[in-house]
Image (cartoon, grey):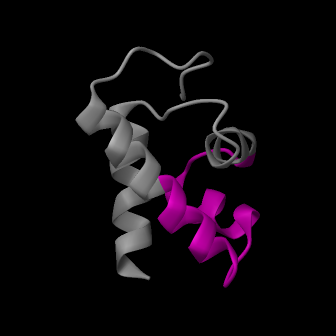
Amino acid sequence: MAQKEKQKLSREELDKQKELRDLYRHTLEKGTQQYIAKMTGISAPVLSSFKNEKINLYPYLYVKLEAYLKKQ
């Protein structure tokens, strides 16, 4: 599950989260959030919160989303 509150991450970790968030937003232009949720096993509300910078993803969710997005 994603983190409800943004935890304290290092600058490098925050930069990685931002890069993935930007890639996710770009990919959403081509597909739907529901489809990406289904393909990654990450709930749509979590993806929405991540996209809107309300949360950062736990590492295991980050890896799932990153793997999916890099295939696109």
Position of 60 relative to 25 (above/below)? above
Residue 34 position by quadrant: bottom right
Relative to 45, is 53 on the left or the right?
Answer: left
Residue furthest front as drawn: 11
Q: Position of residue 58 (x, y in %)?
A: 42, 30
State the residue at coordinates (45%, 15%).
7
Residue 22: within the magenta?
Answer: yes
Q: From which residue to which does the magenta span run?
A: 21-44
Residue 26 position by quadrant: bottom right
Q: Quadrant of the N terminus?
A: top right
Q: Position of residue 37 (x, y in %)?
A: 64, 57
Q: Position of residue 20 (x, y in %)?
A: 43, 56
Position of 1 relative to 24 (above/below)? above
Relative to 70, is 65 on the left or the right?
Answer: right
Towards the viewer: 24 or 44: 24
State the residue at coordinates (58%, 75%).
27
Relative to 42, is 33 on the left or the right?
Answer: right
Residue 49: within the magenta?
Answer: no
Instruction: Report how many numbered discs are placed on residues in the image.
Output: 0
State the residue at coordinates (70%, 79%).
29
Position of 68 relative to 29 (above/below)? above
Towards the viewer: 18 or 50: 18
Residue 35 position by quadrant: bottom right
Q: Main secondary structure of the magenta part?
A: helix
State the residue at coordinates (54%, 29%).
2
Relative to 56, is 68 on the left or the right?
Answer: left
Position of 48 relative to 70 (above/below)? above
Q: Quadrant of the C terminus?
A: bottom left
